[in-house]
């Protein structure tokens, strides 16, 4: 379900990802006006598998001490206690780790790596052991046809095994790259997900202060979850079907991913009706998180 294209792991294409190559690209951030406000996101593939990963992170932190560092990782390298300790000693960062299933059988089937569930869980434990106030840990759940039925169990696992974690993000997949290629196996419609979401509203609200939902048009969610919806896709990645022109919530809505519209269609999106009341977000993040509460 990854958005990377087929063959992205081909080692013969790894030239631009040398220590010098990555560093020079990251340091270009200094050319942006007000660059300290920009976050640096290390993603992949799997960034921690880079042979000079820790050296790269150390240099980035030294050169750009005021930029937020975000690491999107499968968490497996953190199963090695020494690695976890060294990474967390480098300095502040936000770490994002996906859990694909509540047990090894499902998680490993999705990652295609036997033992990956055990390593990811151990990695999370090690991060919690060594992290300090300057670190943030976020668990991510990418919904697919394969794990939708397991959503509740995955969230229960996070709640029961890692009660210190409050930041959880549930993500609707983007149908590009490998995800589009494997559409038959992983593809979902928003209408498939809405029922599952409705059943979980009250439990989620009680369990996670920092729950967020990424890539959901508002009408694809029960109204009670609108306050958790974030607009996280760029303008060229989304579209608004014609029926959205009559929608009074359009200015708060993410819209529909262009690839979803192409592959699945847009008939299911309809302007919400009824006496819906919303509380707007007037904070600095209102562009990304426009509604705080809806009933
Ligand atoms: S009808 Fe369109 S604008 Fe309105 S909530 Fe649905 S997708 Fe968003």
Image (cartoon, rainbow, N blue to C red):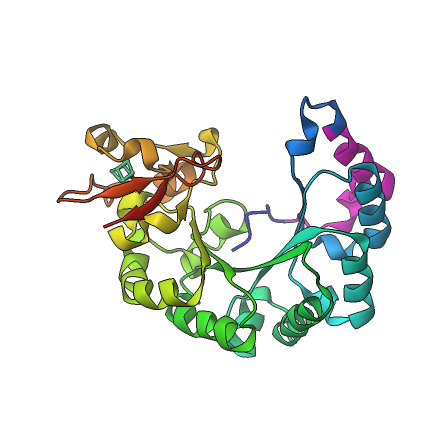
Horizontal side of residue 238 vs 127, given as left or right: left
Give the camera-side residue of 276 and 72.
276
Name the residue: 40% across, 35% down: 282
Name the residue: 47% across, 48% down: 180
Q: Is residue 245 above or below residue 273?
A: above
Name the residue: 69% across, 66% down: 127
From where the camera sits, is residue 18 visible?
no
Name the residue: 38% across, 39% down: 281
Residue 182 is a magenta residue:
no
Q: Is residue 108 above or below residue 245?
A: below
Q: In this view, does 254 lie above or below 77?
A: above
| Residue range (magenta) | 7-29
When asked about the image quadrant of residue 162, the answer is bottom right
Q: Is residue 289 above or below residue 53?
A: above
Give the camera-side residue of 35 and 7.
35
Residue 18 is a magenta residue:
yes
Horizontal side of residue 15 vs 196, given as left or right: right
Q: Position of residue 158 (x, y in %)?
A: 51, 71
Q: How many numbered tags mark residues here?
A: 0
When asked about the image quadrant of residue 211, the answer is bottom left
Horizontal side of residue 281 vs 36, given as left or right: left
Q: Where is residue 284 in the image (x, y as percent from the top left)?
A: 48, 34
Q: Where is residue 242 in the image (x, y as percent from the top left)?
A: 24, 29
Q: Position of residue 75 (x, y in %)?
A: 67, 63
From where the camera sits, is residue 121 visible?
yes
When asked about the image quadrant of residue 239, the answer is top left
Ligand 1 quadrant in view: top left
Give the camera-side residue of 117 and 272.
272
Q: Main secondary structure of the magenta part?
A: helix
């Amino acid at each position: 379900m990854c958005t990377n294209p087929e063959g992205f792991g081909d080692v013969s294409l790894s030239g631009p990802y040398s220590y010098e190559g990555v560093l020079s690209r990251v340091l270009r951030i200094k050319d942006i006006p007000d660059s300290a406000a920009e976050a640096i996101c290390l993603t992949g593939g799997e960034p921690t598998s880079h042979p000079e990963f820790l050296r790269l992170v150390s240099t980035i932190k030294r050169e750009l001490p005021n930029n937020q560092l975000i690491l999107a990782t499968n968490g497996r390298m953190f199963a090695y206690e020494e690695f976890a300790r060294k990474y967390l000693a480098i300095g502040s960062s936000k770490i994002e780790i996906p859990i694909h299933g509540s047990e090894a059988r499902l998680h490993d089937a999705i990652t295609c790596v036997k033992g990956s569930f055990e390593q990811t869980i151990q990695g999370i434990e090690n991060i919690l052991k060594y992290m300090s106030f300057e670190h943030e840990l976020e668990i991510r759940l990418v919904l697919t046809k394969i794990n939708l039925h397991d959503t509740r169990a995955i969230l229960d696992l996070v709640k029961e095994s890692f009660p210190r974690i409050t930041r959880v993000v549930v993500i609707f997949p983007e149908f590009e790259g490998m995800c589009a290629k494997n559409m038959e196996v992983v593809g979902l419609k928003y209408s498939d997900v809405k029922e599952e979401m409705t059943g979980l509203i009250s439990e989620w609200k009680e369990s996670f202060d920092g729950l967020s939902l990424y890539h959901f048009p508002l009408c694809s969610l029960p109204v009670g979850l609108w306050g958790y919806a974030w607009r996280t896709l760029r303008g060229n990645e989304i579209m608004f079907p014609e029926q959205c022109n009559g929608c009074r919530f359009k200015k708060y809505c993410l819209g529909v991913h262009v690839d979803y519209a192409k592959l699945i269609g847009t008939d299911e999106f309809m302007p919400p009706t009824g006496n819906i009341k919303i509380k707007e977000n007037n904070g600095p993040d209102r562009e990304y998180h426009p509604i705080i509460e809806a009933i």
